[in-house]
Image (cartoon, helix red, strand yellow):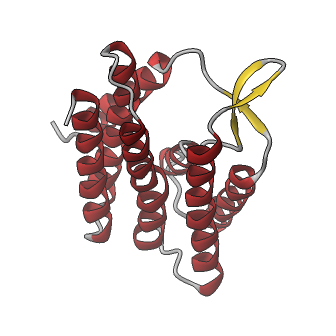
Amino acid sequence: MNIPNIITTVSISTACIAIIQAINGQLYWSIFFGLASFFVDCLDGYAARILHQESVLGRQYDSLSDSLVYVVWPAILTYVNFGLRDSYSVSVLIVFVCAGLFRLARFNSIGMVHTKYGSAYPGMPVVFSHVILLGYVFSGSLQQSRLLLLEAAFIIHSVLMVSRIPFPKPASSYPIAGVAAILLFWYFFGLGFL
């Protein structure tokens, strides 16, 4: 196992802890570990490139990690902690999980698409599930009317993930990792965990 795969293993481990915390009803700890997993996930591909350790195994392993971090954890978190348990909500979450896994599988099979503007992802990346969740949580309201907006966001995200609309690839993952680190720091200290 090389260094990038070890980093992916850390991301998977923190995603598993986030899932366990969500199942145990520990919303804030679940979000903390979900953000930590997101931050670590930003590092494995970078490490593979600078260490010249890119591999097919590493790409597949990272995709499995992404399925936990960006698909399974958000679905479990919203089901358990936000009370999306009626049949419509469960259907929305099932569609979201299927769309996310389809998106990851399609990317594994065809890779990036090339447009006149450069390389792009085929369909919206699964990472945007974190944007939806964090926007919802940081808005500070868990009211029923806002849950409908969350469900609508998951439906729109699902449609965009399975679409063939090209989403431009960022030139660097540094800004994404930086935002994740700032959110993690703010979240942890802002809630008084330390």
Which quadrant of the figure contains the C terminus? top left
Q: Position of residue 124 (x, y in %)?
A: 68, 43
Q: Residue furthest bottom?
A: 87
Horizontally, residue 122 falls left or right of residue 54, namely: right
Q: Residue furthest left?
A: 194
Horizontally, residue 1 falls left or right of residue 175, namely: left
Which quadrant would residue 153 be assigned to in this image? bottom right
Q: Residue furthest right?
A: 116
Residue 129 in the image: above or below residue 185:
below
The residue closer to the viewer here, 86 or 99, is 99
Q: Position of residue 130 (x, y in %)?
A: 50, 45
**Residue placed at 31% from the left, 61% from the top?**
19
Residue 140 in the image: above or below residue 116:
below
Residue 191 visible at all: no
The residue closer to the viewer here, 171 or 130, is 171
Q: Position of residue 108 (x, y in %)?
A: 55, 45
Looking at the rendered structure, the number of numbered marks drawn on it comes to 0
The residue closer to the viewer here, 194 or 80, is 80
Which quadrant would residue 5 be assigned to in this image? top left
Residue 174 visible at all: yes
**Residue placed at 53% from the left, 42% from the top?**
127
Which quadrant of the figure contains the N terminus? top left
Which quadrant would residue 40 be assigned to in this image? top left
**Residue placed at 48% from the left, 21% from the top?**
173
Residue 163 in the image: above or below residue 73:
above
Q: Position of residue 73 (x, y in %)?
A: 41, 59
